[in-house]
Image (tube, grey):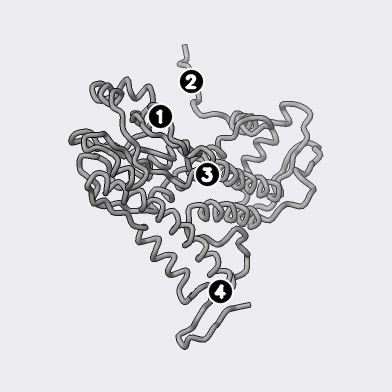
């Protein structure tokens, strides 16, 4: 008996194209958008976390200089507290009543983890300890004066000034997700636009055999191009149908939309960008100055808010934590703003030189 030939483990050309069209049929889920969103989410997180630099954190806190902003990015507000010789920076929950301004008077610290994490990693003894502790929230120096020496204290760190609910607001990652989702759509749209302008046509076939002939002919296109053969013979009489007859949006328009949306995202965090509408032409000096000054102002506002909270922590716990704007960001924005004074450009001689 003749030995059986091994089954070809590689998919046929037909299988490849059928899988391709099945994946991208109308109504199916395209993973490209989600993959792009994952990349943009990581970039957004790093943009936010690396804006500020912390020094002199107590060793007992057991956190790196990036962990504070990471927690704020995901939680909006966290509480800095101390119990005996341990420092904590954790989410919190109300314990008791609020004051006349609606602020939490006393809180309990909550482990920064999911229920699944608790089962695996959280020290049960520490968790039980925290559940039995109540901390008085310190909002200003007067609160410190009215707090006994043995009373447990906590200072709340917030991302930005609260809205109607003075204790909580929307975490930054949730605020930026709609913008990132919008950005993740532009590149697939651009890809579709490129497909429609590629010159590829649909071919109507009458049966499966003709379909196989077309797929085989398609597989020969690359070989024909590289060998310099301008024509490929195809058996049969088939009608050609264009993929799209309408005008196709220019590729650069998608990138401009993407960049403008990303500039808006950066602007919300006080990071240097090209403005909400980034022109294809060169920016005037005055436009560049306006964009840079607006970013500097927002970054400074958020820094001042964070520094005020850190200063209160230092006073409450006798620490010397310092916070600074990331030097790389300062250097970048100073370069972008080089030669500007109050929105006006001055050359070495001090003469205004603002482009109109």
Q: Which residue is mark 2?
A: 5
Label 4 crowd (10 A; few <14 / some 14-19 / many >=20): some
Could you tell whether 85 is left or right of 342 in the image?
left
Q: Quadrant of the C terminus?
A: bottom right
Residue 239: where, in percent of width, then height?
Answer: 81, 39
Q: Is residue 36 above or below residue 338?
A: above
Which mark lies nearer to you, 3 or 2?
A: 3
Mark 2 burial class by Cα count in 10 Å: few <14, some 14-19, many 20+: few
Residue 13 in view in this figure: no
Q: Is tag 1's residue or tag 4's residue first in the polypeptide sequence?
A: 1
The residue under label 4 is: 285
N-terminal label among 4 and 3: 3
Q: Position of residue 68 (x, y in %)?
A: 34, 43
Relative side of 71 to 223, left or right: left
Helix or strand or loop: what does disc 3 sit on? helix
Separation of residues labelled 1 and 4 (CA atoms): 51 Å
Q: CA distance from mark 4 to mark 3?
A: 29 Å
């Amino acid at each position: 008996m003749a030995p059986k030939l091994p089954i070809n483990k590689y998919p046929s050309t037909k299988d490849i194209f059928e899988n391709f069209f099945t994946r991208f049929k109308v109504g199916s889920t395209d993973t490209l958008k989600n993959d792009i969103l994952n990349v943009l989410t990581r970039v957004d997180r790093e943009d936010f976390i690396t804006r500020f630099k912390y020094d002199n954190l107590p060793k007992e806190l057991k956190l790196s200089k990036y962990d504070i902003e990471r927690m704020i990015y995901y939680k909006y507000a966290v509480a800095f507290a101390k119990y005996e010789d341990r420092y904590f920076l954790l989410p919190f929950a109300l314990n008791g009543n609020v004051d006349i301004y609606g602020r939490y008077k006393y809180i309990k610290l909550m482990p920064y983890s999911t229920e699944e994490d608790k089962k695996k990693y959280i020290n049960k003894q520490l968790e039980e300890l925290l559940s039995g502790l109540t901390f008085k929230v310190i909002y200003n120096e007067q609160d410190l004066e009215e707090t006994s020496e043995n009373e447990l204290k906590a200072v709340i760190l917030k991302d930005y000034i609260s809205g109607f609910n003075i204790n909580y607001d929307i975490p930054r990652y949730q605020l930026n997700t709609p913008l990132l989702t919008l950005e993740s759509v532009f590149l697939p749209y651009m890809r579709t636009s490129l497909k429609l302008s590629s010159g590829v046509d649909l071919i109507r076939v009458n049966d499966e055999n003709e379909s196989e002939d077309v797929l085989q002919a398609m597989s020969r296109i690359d070989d024909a191009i590289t060998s310099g053969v301008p024509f490929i013979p195809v058996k049969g009489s088939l009608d050609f149908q264009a993929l799209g007859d309408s005008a196709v949006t220019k590729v650069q328009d998608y990138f401009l939309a993407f960049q403008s949306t990303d500039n808006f995202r950066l602007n919300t965090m006080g990071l240097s960008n090209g403005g909400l509408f980034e022109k294809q032409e060169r920016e005037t000096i005055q436009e560049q100055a306006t964009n840079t000054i607006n970013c500097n102002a927002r970054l400074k506002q958020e820094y001042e808010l964070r520094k005020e909270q850190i200063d209160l922590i230092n006073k409450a716990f006798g620490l010397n934590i310092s916070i600074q704007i990331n030097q790389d960001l300062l250097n970048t924005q100073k370069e972008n703003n080089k030669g500007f004074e109050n929105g006006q450009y001055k050359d070495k001689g001090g003469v205004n030189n603002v482009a109109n």
